[in-house]
Amino acid sequence: MRSLFRYLPTLLIGVVLGSFIAIAGTVFADRNQSAIPFEELRTFTEVFHRIKSDYVEEVDDKTLLENAIAGMLSGLDPHSNYLTPDVFKEIQIGTTGEFGGLGIEVGMENGFIKVIAPIDDTPAQRAGMQAGDLIIRLDDAPVKGMTLTDAVKIMRGKPGTSIKLTVVRDTEDKPIHITIVRDIIKVKSVKSRTLAPGYGYVRISHFQTQTVRDLEKAIYALKKENKGRLNGLVLDLRNNPGGVLNGAVEVSDSFLPKGLIVYTQGRVDDSSFKFKAHPRDLINGAPMVVLVNGGSASASEIVAGALQDHKRAIIMGTKTFGKGSVQTILPMNNDAALKLTTARYYTPLGRSIQAEGIEPDILLNNVEIASVEKEDGFLKESDLTGHLENGNSEKSSKKKDSAEEADVPLIKKDYAVYEALNLLKGLNIIKTQRN
């Protein structure tokens, strides 16, 4: 065995770097590559040897080398990692079909799982998960030491099964426990409604390949409801963790008649792109307010940044997440893949989104609107103990209460939407006065 380790530096150079050929004990380097890091490879070989000979349990070479590759990637940034054949296959299933899961977009932070955002209408959102939550345990297993890939694999599972998450939240003094029942994740990316006559609201929860088509349908429906035109639009990107780059570009293009939308820059030519707008605007120049928060990431930040730089919309809310990097999945010969960060996003004015996020034009802290009952100070008949009912059955009364609750306008439940609508109305008043 010791004679084998004498030659491991030469062998591992070929295995790890893939740029060298070992023939008869001689190593030939590709001229386009930098100098061979012999000292570091010698250290790597020594560690490999120590584990093989002294570790408490026997570990096979395949496991050690896969762990070494995974560690090499995870040390780069929170989004680069090694996808084993099984994990790579799961990712392909997740992007092309349905899967059982929780419905949260996650990343790594200091060894823990950080929730970027819960996705609308998923088990995670219904269970109360929030952007910024740190998951420290999955059932009884501590997250510390897990890779992001391993953690995601545990969180996915058969629909109907449950998982208990131990969560650290800034607003809580101690960890909280949240049990979530897995379900089939189906993301409806676009929702819309009329806020007031002439003013529309569109919520994009995730960017998918069909998002722009759903957006167009929503805008046309809003126009139809409002006599053919909109005087203003609220575009809600809060807790939108991102998604497909082309989806973000096409949504931005739907409101920008010209100019640069976003560009990427990396070390290789293939990772550098520029995306430009085409001459169209779905709402014909009507004012826009874009709502963002700390759960707005990646593709959401591209849209917010493009509309802000072109002064096409007012950005309102709190600072966004700050994920401005591009990940490329590179398939390998062994059916595995590398998920590698290959470029950074930049807004039209050259601002890097990475670790900075988008600063809103109007800072709006999270405020919950609560109705104030008995605001006139007078007692009502219904407040008296033993009062007579009005004669309708209890069933119909409950039905009426639930219907009234469902019909509460969004602006009465959501402070940010309320403020956005007021701003749009104000902009239209100013515009009218100027004309």
Image (spheres, rainbow, N blue to C red):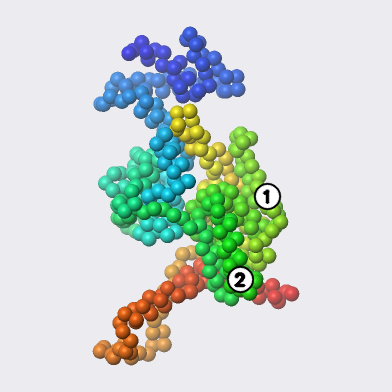
Which disc, if any, is residue 4?
Answer: none
In the image shown, does 410 or 404 lie closer to the viewer?
Answer: 404
Q: Is residue 394 visible?
A: yes
Q: Amino acid at mark 1?
A: Lys
Spatial CA distance of label 1 from label 2 is 29 Å
The amino acid at mark 2 is Lys
Residue furthest toward the right? 435
**Which of the 4 image quadrants contains residue 132?**
bottom left
Q: Residue at the location (41% across, 16% down)? A: 8
Dot 1 or dot 2: first in sequence order is 2
SS for callout 1: strand
The answer to whether residue 358 shows anywhere in this view is: no
Quarter of the rendering occupied by the N terminus: top left
Q: Residue at x 46, y 64 (%)?
A: 366
Q: Is residue 179 left or right of residue 260?
A: left
Within 10 Å of the Cα at label 1, are there few (<14), some (14-19), or many (20+) other Cα atoms?
A: some
Residue 432 is drawn in which quadrant? bottom right
Label drawn at residue 224? 2
Check residue 276 in the rendering and tell me which mark sits there, or answer none. Answer: 1
| Position above or below: 203 against 300 | below
Residue 416 at x, y percent in the picture: 51, 67
User: Going by the image, does 117 lie left or right of 233?
Assistant: left
Give the crowd class for mark 2: few <14, some 14-19, many >=20 residues within 10 Å: few
